[in-house]
Image (tube, grey):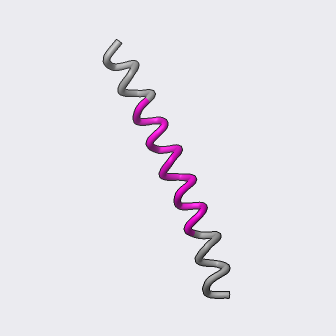
Amino acid sequence: AKDWEATIASSTAWAMIASIRMLIRRTARYCYA
């Protein structure tokens, strides 16, 4: 059960990181354009 929880936590963390990076790219594109 612990391993399962850890995988869910890590996958959600990676999803958050990916979305944050996309947001940063979009905002950077608007700021520097």
Magenta residues span: 9-24
> Is residue 11 part of the magenta span, yes or no?
yes
> Is residue 10 part of the magenta span, yes or no?
yes
- Residue 24: quadrant of the picture: bottom right
Most distant residue in the left direction: 2
Report the label total.
0
Task: Indicate the quadrant containing the C terminus: top left, top right, bottom left or bottom right.
Answer: bottom right
Q: Position of residue 18 (x, y in %)?
A: 53, 52
Most distant residue in the top direction: 1
Name the residue located 65 percent from the left edge and 78 percent from the top edge.
29
Is 17 on the left-hand or right-hand side of 30? left
Is 17 on the left-hand or right-hand side of 19? left
- Residue 25: quadrant of the picture: bottom right
Most distant residue in the bottom direction: 33
Q: Position of residue 15 (x, y in %)?
A: 53, 44
Name the residue located 41 percent from the left edge and 27 percent from the top edge.
7
Q: Position of residue 12 (x, y in %)?
A: 48, 37
In the image, residue 10 sits, relative to residue 8, either above or below, namely below
In the image, residue 15 sits, relative to residue 29, either above or below, namely above
Name the residue located 41 percent from the left edge and 36 percent from the top edge.
10
Task: Indicate the quadrant containing the N terminus: top left, top right, bottom left or bottom right.
Answer: top left
Q: Position of residue 27 (x, y in %)?
A: 61, 73
Is 2 on the left-hand or right-hand side of 9? left
Give the main secondary structure, helix, strand or loop, of the magenta stretch.
helix
Is 33 on the left-hand or right-hand side of 7? right
